[in-house]
Image (cartoon, helix red, strand yellow):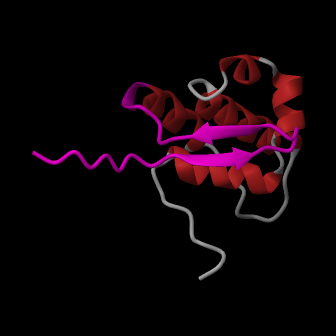
Amino acid sequence: MSTNHARLSVDVEFADGKTRTVRPLKIKTLRKFVKVAEDLDVQSGKLTDEDIDKMMAAAAIIMEDVDPSLAADKDALEDAVDVEIFWTIMQLGMGNKLADPNE
């Protein structure tokens, strides 16, 4: 029987200077996330306040299991997440491994 545990988890330094470990979403959380994320359309290159609100709603769902107090505080979440961090936690939440910038 194998004892190799390869669950993806990545320590991410957030814009507030705190490092948090982000993992793929549990199925229960993924269901909530998909409902919000399917309305995200950030490909146009123009972000509206509505787009940013949807991004923060998606980020809050991802953060529910990582840092519940941050997920519940919209102002603190907006201070802790920048665009790069948003895309990083989106990828990790969906279970995608990040590309190594050194390769």
Q: Please tell me in which quadrant of the rendered image residue 62 appears.
A: top right
| 90 on left or right of 85 | left
Q: Please tell me in which quadrant of the rendered image residue 52 appears.
A: top right
The secondary structure that dominates the magenta segment is loop
Q: Position of residue 94 (x, y in %)?
A: 48, 48
Q: Which residue is pictured at 47% across the width and 36% down the height?
A: 25
Instruction: State the residue in front, 32 or 103.
Output: 103
**Which residues are the magenta region?**
1-28
Q: Is residue 85 above or below residue 29?
A: below
Q: Which residue is pictured at 80% across the width and 53% down the height?
A: 83
Q: Which residue is pictured at 68% across the width and 54% down the height?
A: 87
Q: Is residue 25 above or below residue 10?
A: above
Q: Position of residue 60 (x, y in %)?
A: 68, 29
Q: Classify the position of the C terminus by image quarter.
A: bottom right
| 8 on left or right of 17 | left
Q: Position of residue 21 (x, y in %)?
A: 61, 39
Residue 10 appears in the figure:
yes
Please tell me how many numbered marks the rendered image carries: 0
In the displayed orientation, state which residue is furthest to the left.
1
Q: Which residue is pictured at 70% across the width and 63% down the height?
A: 43
Residue 41 appears in the figure:
no
Q: Position of residue 29 (x, y in %)?
A: 47, 27
In the displayed orientation, state which residue is furthest to the bottom.
103
Asked if the magenta segment contains residue 15, the reply would be yes
